[in-house]
Image: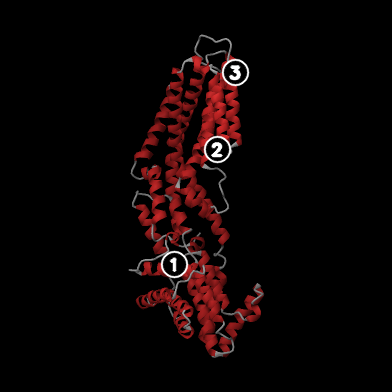
Amino acid sequence: MNRLGIGFLGACFGSLLVVLLHPLTRGLANPLVDQQIKADLNSHPMVLRNTRVVPEPKDATGAAFWLLVASREAVLGRSGNHRDLAETLEVARGWSEHDKDNAFWLQMESAVLWDRGLHDQSIQAWISAAKAARWEDYQMDRLQVIRKAISRTFTNVPSWVDLYLTTERSSFAGQYLMRHATRLLTRAPLTTASGLKLRYAIARAGHLIRGGSSSIELAQIGSSIAELAGRDRTMAAESTPRRLLFARIQLADHLRKAKMENEADDVVSIYRATTGWSYFLDQDALREEREQLGIGALAATGIVPLSTYGILWGTVLIVLGWFAQKIPVQWWQSWWIGIGTASIGLALLVATGLWIHSMVMFLCGVMMCFRSRAVRRADPANVGIGFQSICTIIALYSLVILGLMWIYGSSIRQYLIPGVFPEWNPSFTLATLWGSLLMILVVTLTLGPTFALLTRYRVDRLASQALMSSGRVLCMLGIVIGGIAGPLAMATDQFQERDAGALLRSEPLYFFNR
């Protein structure tokens, strides 16, 4: 390598060191931090999947989380006993006094009252909730609590964390209220003033939920609750746009006939807003946006670990190559090396069922059994371009396997892939990846006896050169990728974090402001 190449590698290595050591980026490049994130997400009490029993709430976020867990149990058919319902009712009723202009508490109180058989009180609470000015379920505050717990580990939070937290939003409260609104509708005939009053409260409730939700799914539930207010029994089996429009007009018409002009005008405004927001409440668009941001997060977060793993594995190959020089040539020409390698291949097949890996290793073992008859005395300083090309291919394949191993062991695989890429099920397993690395090592060693047959050079020198050449290429690739792409990836991730953060704050507003 000339001086220019050495200088280039030195610059890349210095750049990689800056990324690994700088306070703003070292946390993102540290695999131990990744494990800390995983531990935090698996144990945090505000992550819904970790929680079955909620401690007594001390603030609005804790109280809303209590009601969210209660909603989940009700929707999944795991509702507690009368005592549990009484405690849930106490939480909802208590916070409706503290946060009077928030309809969420009264709506949840109404649903719990109905579950306890107190239907008249439930209806009154629902109608009272319609007079509130806003709707907030404090899920954004809950997600920020989780984010704050994660961010204590390092200066900058990677964008994939915000992206994952968007999948932690839950619609259980909305589903619970939707079911309750359907039950209320049975007590709200279009022909009575009390029934129309309750239907208006249902439309108003849906409007408040849609307007206050930070989730597209929950906003869609709110729109469905608003649409529910105009339905009658004849619409149970048919919900075409024409029928929905007719239901809207019919509800406003009945309200005006009952001398409820203000409510009728409000219903018209509610349905007009529902139609307008429907263009921004697209679950498919949300999924596509998450996938695009997820691909960027996956690439940006994996560049530095990939380069580090490449350097480490390349160093291992170089060290093994140095040891290969110390093995006597008689050992390389022994039948036992070939037989042992072939046996390892068969054992791998029995243990893991990896046919391709096992057969390649078996064939490599067979190849090692062939010995060169004549041996040149000179060292193989330059075997040829074919030998070096194979070593380069081995290094590139090793880099791909190391990248897949990083994905397999990282938090991104556990959280980002199932949450953001629900249809992407990686077919590789840990056994497949370790089997691939073992196969790479065996194939590299097999270059020794193979090229010894072709060139008549000493097999130990060729095997050592194959290992060391592949290791050097892998180290150089790791340094170049980490030195050039590492800083760019970190900068890109920080830029992308703004989009992921905006999506976390409010999904409907994210698409509205684009």
- Residue identifier under label 1: 69
241 left or right of 443?
A: right
Between label 1 and label 3, give the one nearer the viewer. Answer: 3
- Residue identifier under label 3: 370
Residue 81, visible in the rendered structure: yes
- Tell me the kind of residue under disc 2: Ala
39 left or right of 248?
A: left
Q: Is residue 63 above or below residue 485?
A: below
Residue 40: x %, y % from top left: 38, 53
- Tell me the kind of residue under disc 3: Phe
Which callout, 2 or 3, points at the residue further toward the start of the chain? 2
Q: Do the residues labelled 2 and 3 touch (CB within 8 Å)?
A: no
Residue count near mark 2 (Cα–Cα under 10 Å), binned few <14, some 14–19, many ≥20: few
- Measure how far apart labels 2 and 3 are at the Cα level: 27 Å
> Residue 351 — which label?
2
Q: Is mark 1 on a helix, strand or loop?
A: helix
Scheme of colours in the image: secondary structure
- Measure how far apart labels 2 and 1 are at the Cα level: 43 Å
Residue count near mark 3 (Cα–Cα under 10 Å), binned few <14, some 14–19, many ≥20: some
Residue 99: x %, y % from top left: 37, 75
Residue 388, visible in the rendered structure: no
Residue 15: x %, y % from top left: 39, 35
Q: Is mark 3 on a helix, strand or loop?
A: loop
Residue visible at 57% across and 13% down in the picture: 456
